[in-house]
Amino acid sequence: MSTRSNGLRAPKPRRPILDSPSQRRLTRRSDQNASMIANEGFFLAVAQIAVALAGFSGLVVATRGASPSGWSARDTWSLAGMFGASIGALFLALLPSLLFFLRLPTEVVWMLASLLMAAFLVVFALTMAWCCRKLSRSGQPPRVRYFSTAATLLLFACGSLAGLGALGIFGQAVIGVFVLGLMACLLVSALALVVFLMIFARTARSAFANSPRPFAAVASRRR
C-alpha cells in the first residue's frame, strides 16, 4: 500500500541544519547590521546639529557688522574655536558610516574612528590652548574667565579616552566613548557661540551708549 491510501502523508524533506559556527556568524552579522542602522541615525542627527551650530556661527559673523580687519585676535580665536568644534563634530559623526560603507569589520571601524577622533581632539585642544596662552601674553586676556581652560581640558580628556578606546581598553564601550567625544565637541561649540553672542551684545551696547544721539543734538540746537 502507498502512504496516500493509508491516509498518511509522506514526510517532508528536512532542511539542512547549519552548524553552530555558521549560525553564530549569521546572528552576529544581523546584530551588527541592526546596531549599525541605529547608530547611523544617531550620528546623522549629531551631524545635523553640528551643521546648525556652524550656520549660527556664520550668522554671527554676518551680523557683527565689522570688517575682518576690525576684529581683534581674541575674536578670531573664539570664531576659530566655534567653527573647529562644530566642523570637527560634523566629520567625526559621518566617519563611522563612511568606514562601514568600506565593508570593514566592526572592530576595525571603531578602532579607526576612535583613533582619528583622538588625534583631532588632542591636536585641536593643544592648538587652541597654545593660541589662547599666546594671546594672554600679548595683552588680550580671555573675556570669560576659565572658559578656555575648561574647554581645553574637556576636549583633551575626551581625546585621551578615545585614544585608549582605539587601543581596545574599553572593549564594546568604545562606542560610548566615541559618542562622548562628539557631545564634547557640540558642547564646546554651543558654549563658545553663547559666549560670543554675549560679547557681541555687550560691545553693541557700549557702542550705542558712546555714539552721539541725533535727536538730542537736534533738540539742543533748537534751544
Image (spheres, helix red, strand yellow):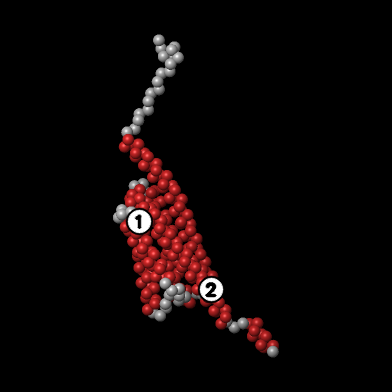
Taking 131 as reference, is 30 above or below it? above
148, 56: nearer the viewer = 148
Image spot of residue 23 (x, y percent) = 35, 36
Q: Secondary structure at mark 1?
A: helix
Image spot of residue 139 (x, y percent) = 40, 80
Give the residue at mark 1: 114
Label whose residue precedes the other's in the sequence (2 or 1): 1
87, 205: nearer the viewer = 205
Image spot of residue 207 (x, y percent) = 55, 79
At label 2, counting other C-alpha atoms closer than 10 Å, the crowd grade (few under 14, some 14-19, many 20 or more) is few
The structure residue drawn at horizontal position 48% and vertical position 57%, both measured from the top left corner, is 48
Q: Are marks 2 and 1 in contact (CB under 8 Å)?
A: no
Whether residue 83 is visible here, answered yes or no, is: no
Query: Is residue 186 toward the left or the right of residue 174 in the image?
Result: right
Whether residue 8 is visible here, answered yes or no, is: yes
Determine which quarter of the picture holds residue 14: top left
The amino acid type of the residue labelled 2 equals Ala
The structure residue drawn at horizontal position 47% and vertical position 74%, both measured from the top left corner, is 68
Q: Which mark is residue 153?
A: none
Query: Is residue 202 toward the left or the right of residue 218 in the image?
Result: left
Q: CA distance from mark 2 to mark 1?
A: 38 Å
The structure residue drawn at horizontal position 69% and vertical position 89%, both measured from the top left corner, is 223
103, 112: nearer the viewer = 112
The amino acid type of the residue labelled 1 equals Ser
Give the residue at mark 2: 201
Farthest right residue? 222
